[in-house]
């Protein structure tokens, strides 16, 4: 008996989820749901394609629905909607709104006897888990999260919106000296500027003023003003050759001290050639957990903190103890 | 209301647990239990000291008992014994016997309405968790565990048993080239010899034959024959100055591939100035979980795989979501 999965939304994330399901023998993609005309959507697998309005017909035929929309407007609307009928997984990442989002989804789950795991991915997600682990195991200490080397979608978009910019990517890089200090257990106090630098590669429209655009980028409030930012102006060819991937990663470091004064350092790191594909892989593992926990009688919203790793693994607890403990 | 902890066995690990409890405001050390004459045992805190035979009198007064004995003979006897009366935590690390140990303890738990979390620490323990996570998230890939730089107790003991050796420590070191290949996602096949080297620092008895002892070490079956081993003969002074700590650590790396062919690398690493103090810190966090899960009605044996991180943290799920997700 395979676990039956549905996908809502077929962008980068939805495509990644489709690929990740293909890597898991205990899972099956039943259908992709789209807001577009289903006739116009081509997918990689043989799964059915339906309009989102048809999802209700799949009650009982899908064990977990993975909602692959954006955090700004899609997920706050779609997750409560689909949680009426299905267990759900999402990658909601608007940190400040997580508590409110959780309460909204949980209320639907309670009424509908469903289980939703919210804010799944790597940050929020696996990085969050390691922040909790670090604090729990080393209560006296400091936690540091560094991101990169990686492409930041939001910052790339911000640069692309500048008049005269034809195309742009922005990479976030951790500052090596800061990382070194943290790894050595020096527990430094680090400002925003001391932790990360930002690098932009931009293609200009013909006749655009390079100096003016560069100035506009490096002084942009919220996005760049608090960082040391470097802007490289490149050709469209170079852009297409070197800057169309979506690498990312980073690390969570807990630098703590045992009661007797010993320095103890815990680090979790990711080096990802594709950010959306990795996020998708995490979503799929937690889709298994949502189904399993729901089968065990759980009802309600959960975060990754509430899900034991035995629930995300295809192996039985007996196998896990014998093979991996 | 604090969580009331008991310690069975007061060696390095027991002392570390006592220190770790002092770092956790929601916990209280009620008593240390020893097989020695309690009058002869001095501890760091104000907790009571009792003979192990008096433990039964503490039923209802201790929420979780942390059993700090050795895996060879202590834990297989003590964990089932104390699980009759208390929730327990142990660091049982004889990998091949874990399934049998689990079944034995679980049978006692079921009869006694208690909860035991077995094989807690960093390996088995946090490293095991990361092996499961890596496989679940990246089903196509390879998992590598490297240990070190660190002092290996068993190997140090083996060297100390050689006639003519007055004192000795053995350090396990990961081979940097092997680690580099794994981190680059090359997914190499690595022999035992290619993964780790071993370095011994030994103090000789007067008149001992250095060449003969060195040969005896490097050819010792099971312990050293499969590794490249270096032996340094040092003075007792140098030994006491530089080799009395118990550092350890290592890393678990999952090198996997998304369906679309992207390399994705996940790494968890530890750099520990004190191995026993860190293991103790992990035991204490899971002692909280044993109590909490038991309060929620759970009965039976568990491994770290079955315990969500929300159960090891002193924070509420609401706090965790707001502060760390």
Image (cartoon, coloured by chain):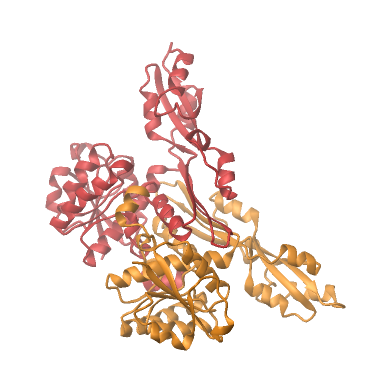
Chain colours: A red, B orange
Where residue A91 appears, as percent x and y from the top left, is 31, 46
Where residue A138 appears, as percent x and y from the top left, is 48, 58
Q: Nearer the viewer, residue B262 or A48?
A: B262
Does the rendering let one see residue B68? yes
Where residue A316 appears, as percent x and y from the top left, is 35, 70
Above or below for B205 versus B229:
below
Which of the 4 image quadrants contains residue A299? bottom left
Report whether B324 appears left or right of B163: left
Q: Residue at x 16, y 42 (%)?
A: A51
Q: Quadrant of the N terminus of chain B?
A: bottom left
Report whether A148 appears left or right of B296: right
Q: Nearer the viewer, residue B116 or B196?
A: B116
Does the rendering let one see residue B304? no
Above or below for A77 versus B240:
above
Above or below for A94 versus A5:
above
Where residue B289 appears, as percent x and y from the top left, is 37, 67
Q: Residue at x 82, y 76 (%)?
A: B212
Residue farthest along the right direction in this orientation: B207
Report whether A209 appears left or right of A115: right
Residue farthest along the top direction in this orientation: A207
Report whether B249 appears left or right of A224: right
Residue farthest along the bottom direction in this orientation: B53
For the image shown, how many numbered marks are present on the structure? Answer: 0
């Amino acid at each position: 008996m395979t676990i039956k999965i549905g996908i809502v939304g077929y962008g980068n994330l939805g495509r990644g989820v489709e690929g990740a399901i293909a890597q898991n023998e205990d899972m099956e993609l039943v259908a992709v749901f789209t807001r577009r005309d289903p006739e116009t959507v081509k997918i990689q697998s043989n799964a059915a394609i339906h309009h989102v309005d048809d999802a209700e017909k799949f009650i009982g035929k899908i064990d977990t629905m993975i909602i692959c929309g954006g955090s700004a407007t899609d997920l706050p609307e779609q997750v409560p909607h689909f949680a009426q009928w299905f267990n759900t997984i999402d990658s909601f990442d608007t940190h400040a709104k997580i508590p409110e989002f959780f309460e909204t989804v949980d209320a639907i789950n309670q009424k509908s006897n469903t289980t939703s795991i919210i804010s799944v991915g790597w940050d929020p997600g696996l990085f969050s888990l390691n922040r909790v682990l670090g604090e729990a195991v080393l209560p006296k200490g400091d936690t540091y999260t560094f991101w990169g080397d990686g492409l930041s979608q939001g910052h790339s978009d911000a640069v692309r919106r500048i008049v005269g910019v034809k195309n742009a990517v922005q990479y976030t890089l951790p500052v090596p000296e800061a990382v070194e200090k943290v790894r050595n257990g020096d527990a430094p106090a680090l400002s925003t500027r001391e932790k990360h630098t930002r690098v932009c590669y931009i293609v200009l429209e013909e006749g655009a003023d390079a100096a003016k655009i560069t100035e506009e980028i490096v002084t942009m409030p919220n996005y760049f003003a608090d960082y040391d930012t470097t802007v490289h102006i490149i050709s469209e060819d170079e852009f297409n050759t070197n800057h169309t991937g979506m690498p990312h990663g980073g690390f969570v470091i807990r630098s703590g001290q045992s009661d007797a004064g010993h320095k103890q350092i815990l680090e979790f790191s990711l080096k990802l050639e594709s950010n959306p594909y990795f996020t998708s892989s995490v979503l799929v593992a937690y889709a298994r957990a949502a189904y399993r926990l729901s089968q065990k009688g759980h009802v309600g919203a959960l975060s990754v903190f509430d899900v034991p790793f035995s629930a995300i693994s295809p192996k039985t607890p007996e196998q896990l103890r014998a093979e991996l403990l």
